[in-house]
Amino acid sequence: MTSESGNGMIAGESDHGHGEHHVHGIMQEDPSAKTPVLRRYNTERMVELVRETLVLIGEDVHRDGLVRTPQRVARAYEFLTQGYAMDIAEVLNGAIFAERYDEMVVVKDIDFFSLCEHHMLPFFGKAHVAYIPNGKIVGLSKIPRIVDVFAHRLQVQERMTLQIAETIQKYLQPQGVAVVTEASHMCMMMRGVEKQNSVTTASAMLGVFKHQVETRSEFMNLISSRLH
Ligand code: ZN
């Protein structure tokens, strides 16, 4: 049994338009890994559109607080959607190892921050990931990075959860994969659609986690103290 707490992150204000700020601490364990190249956005056009949006909202785009807002928003969207430009094969490059270990590997409490594709508002929470190897393991720091790749796109929580599971299935061909995500959705919280503290849970179970009740229960017990 291996269990480790993950470490997610979200965009800070940054002066770099492209780049390095998605390489968080965890990458230091693997300096040889290539940094995936970000897609180049038409930043100028995006800035124009954000400025127009502000006008349509009824704002004065010339007042102090808003002068640089279009640039900041454009950069924020570049960062928050950088997952489109990331290649999983590059992210995992050099971090898959042949290993006879065949017990459950669990990485829980991985923070993630995503944007719902219906409203482009944040949803965020924790991801819990487990797999049972079948001859191959992946460096533990890569699992939060896989979560980041899919979180940094416009998403629905259910699809993101499944994509994380299917990616691990594809690259490791383990005996099984389990992913549970729990998230708060700003589009529900801010619009008062549901109780403000409601948390949405989604899960994807593949292989033995799908077919063996005991295996699934073991995983759920391991993470259940964290579930709401
Ligand atoms: Zn939404």
Image (spheres, helix red, strand yellow):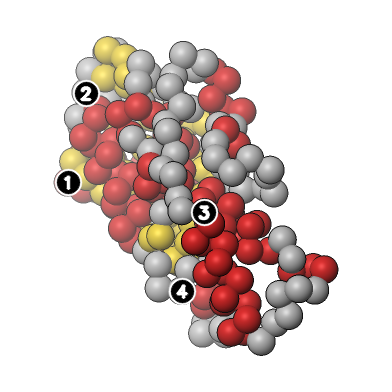
Q: Name the quarter where the N terminus is drawn.
A: top left
| Mark 3 nearby-residue class (10 Å; few <14, some 14–19, many ≥20) | some
Question: Which label lies toward us, 4 or 3?
Answer: 3
- Seen in the picture, residue 202 relative to 141 is either above or below; the reply is below
Side (left or right) of 89 relative to 181: left
Give yes or no for contact between labels 4 and 3 (Cβ–Cβ under 8 Å): no
Side (left or right) of 25 relative to 188: right
Q: Name the residue under label 1.
A: 211
Residue at horizontal 33 percent and vertical 35 percent from the top: 87
- Seen in the picture, residue 152 relative to 53 is either above or below; the reply is above
Residue at horizontal 35 percent and vertical 54 percent from the top: 160
Q: Name the residue under label 4.
A: 119
> Disc 3 or 2, which lies upstream in sequence?
3
Report the disc number at residue 33.
none
Direction right: furthest residue: 64
Question: Which of 52/220 is in front?
Answer: 52
Side (left or right) of 59 relative to 192: right
Measured as percent of width and height from the top left, residue 215 is found at 28, 41
Instruction: Inspect the image, locate mark 1, and give the three-letter code of the amino acid beneath it.
Output: His
Residue at horizontal 68 percent and vertical 44 percent from the top: 14
Label 4 residue near ligand 1, CB within 8 Å: yes
Question: Which label lies toward us, 4 or 1?
Answer: 4
Q: Name the residue under label 2.
A: 134
Q: Name the residue under label 3.
A: 43
Res 164 quadrant in image = top left
